[in-house]
Amino acid sequence: MTDQTQTSQKQQTRQPWRWPQPLAGKNSRIWYGGDYNPEQWPREVWQEDVRLMKQAGVNIVSLAIFSWSRLEPAEGQWDFSLFDEVIDLLGSNGIAVDLATATASPPMWLAKAHPEILPIDEDGRTFWPGARQNWRPTSPVYRRYALEMCRHLAEHYKDNPYVVAWHLGNEYGCHNLYDYSDDANAAFQKWCEERYGTIDAVNKAWGTDFWSQRMTSFDQILVPRHVNGFPNPGKLLDFKRFSSDALLDFCKAERDAIEAVTPDKPCTTNFMVSGAIATGIDYDRWGADMDFVSNDHYFTPGDDHLSELAFSASLMDGIARNKPWLLMEHSTSAVNWRPVNYRQEPGAMLRDSLAHLAFGADGILYFQWRQSQAGAEKFHSAMVPHAGADSQIFRDVCDQGRVLSDLTDAGVLGSRVESSKVAILFDNESGWALQHPTVPTQKLAQFTEPFSWWKAMADLGITADVVPVDGKWQDRGVVVVPNVYLMDEGLADRLRDFAREGGTVIVTYMSGIADRSDRIWLGGYPGALRDLTGVRVEEFSPMGDDFPGVPDHLDLDNGATAHDFADVVTDTADDARVVSRYTADKASGMDGVPAIVLHPYGKGRSLYVGCRLGDTDIAGSLKPLLGDLGLAGLVRSTPQILRVVRVSPDGTKFVFLFNRTREAVSARVEGEVLVASQADAGTAAAAQVAGEPETTEGTIFPAGLIVSRVDD
């Protein structure tokens, strides 16, 4: 490798994992409930709410998330009476409280008195009050008021036996991730100084000699406000890092204010790991600072519904480092913020909840308990819909409560997700870098390659784990490196060591291209991994349809089709085997160019896939190589079924089977059936093979599932 500046993140010390404990006299259960907003309703509704919560099996609610204007109706005037009454009503009925800091949205009086807390966009426009999160993460004024709120809440409720956890903020950065104010500018300068130490190190990392952007002091650094051209890619990448860190710093300040008063109760905040794309927050970095991690997830309509959910939930298990996590929000049916808000299909509500549970969630919560009568989210579904308790949604909510109770009794709590032999690496920062307007093609901006590989593995009958790039993956058999564009020497060495000791590393195009500062590794692509992959790429060959006659695809000789992007592989190592080439007209210069290359490395091997293939073609391309890659023993005969396993310390297994298709699918059901939803668990006599658990042949219908227990 060439000698160039590396700026890897420092290793973080993780908070010890702490989980919300049950109310006094209660046993630990799978947490079940949702956001509760009693301030939207008269008192007589509160009594009805508690009665229905008990009927549904609800044992926890998130409270006061958007309640600052109730708790402090005017500066310095505190009123806890409403929430005192509600918390006592809930707790006396066996319902615990996850109490929010109420800082997600400032009250109108604060914004009016201190407009300097309001965010500024890159064009200099102010985000005025009227929605939510209208505050700057770097505003010292807002921090002062927010931490005062935290301290008052903590002091008031520090001895309340019904508060079991603290809910910091809410969906940090959902609407105020990027702020271009003077406060942000000063904080960005300080962040750069702490990260790099000297202005010369910043100049080198950002390549500021290009376009005469060289700086001589930190006060010359500007946040990337609107410019008349392309912004500096290194600077923009660091601004995204800074923006995530600025919100994390604010979140940690809230946590510290709470824990200074109530150190015995765990803190969390709700992530937004959803959509299988790079998010604006580096949630793996955030996870290290939470007592336990939580997530808000809303389904993707259509064919990818279950696959995207499973991908996101698996990534959450990776962020949680295989510890229990909380599903803080999802929906009973339609959301209200898409152009078209599709309803859930029958059976999907329970299926989705148990899919999150299968991937390690020990709590299932919704937004929200009762559907709002007014406001911006009044058409968002809820546990009690506008139609009331006499509705299919509420009946399903009650059924789900019984299922979660049964699974608790069966012993699911205390089990952990069984690791897959296949890990798909997810690097949020690489996703940020590929969103820059000057990369070879904007078609990679959505960073969907990790998801494509997850679906391809599922199509082969393999349930892969999604693991943060800095997480634990060295104990697997196969590691997929999809579009990990940013790569320092440390990560490259870890991958080499993994292959050298017998592992399989699958590397895709646009991986190992640049260091962590977005400076290109020289000598040919993939610069950081040329020796491991056994290939050398001199040029890229993007594809599109924006000009007549440009290439819009490339055919491979194995029957697959590449789209959007391909590498021009000019050299392969002497011991490498080209397993597929492009077939194209001579004028293209791509005919016969290697597309997929297998390369031995130490006791292991690498597979280089130098083009973008859809999940179907990825699976098809892997099939003849399963033995070479060490995947043959992992393939199941029914890839239509997603199989996830949780294992207890005593060896008991809980096997979750989900139908991935829109057709009925036959399934091999192991052990004792605990849950069968939209499924026939099988009535044939159990057939037992020596050394294997009893099995029956069942049928799982669309949106269906079966959960069974296999005793050790």
Image (cartoon, rainbow, N blue to C red):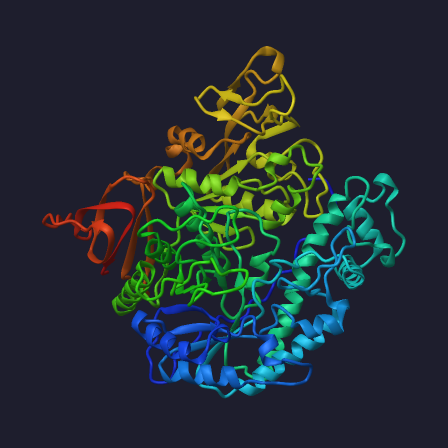
* Residue most extreme to the top: 586
Seen from the viewer's position, the closer of residues 142 and 682 is 142
Answer with left or right where residue 460 lies relative to residue 296.
left
Q: Position of residue 406 (x, y in %)?
A: 26, 66
Which quarter of the picture shows residue 89? bottom left
Answer with left or right where residue 263 lies relative to residue 364.
right
Q: Residue at x 51, y 43 (%)?
A: 450
How many numbered marks, from 0 up?
0
Measured along the vertical axis of the image, is residue 146 above or below residue 356? below
Does the rendering let one see residue 576? no
Locate the N terminus and report the quarter of the image it occupies.
Answer: top right
Measured along the vertical axis of the image, is residue 175 above or below residue 510? below
Measured along the vertical axis of the image, is residue 614 above or below residue 387? above
Q: Position of residue 46 (x, y in %)?
A: 41, 78
Does the rendering let one see residue 184? yes
Answer with left or right where residue 411 lies relative to residue 543.
left
Which quarter of the picture shows residue 210? top right
Q: Residue at x 33, y 54 (%)?
A: 351
Q: Position of residue 343 (x, y in %)?
A: 40, 50
Locate the C terminus and report the quarter of the image it occupies.
Answer: bottom left
Q: Residue at x 46, y 63 (%)?
A: 367
* Residue most extreme to the right: 216
Q: Position of residue 99 (x, y in %)?
A: 51, 76
Measured along the vertical axis of the image, is residue 534 above or below residue 6? above
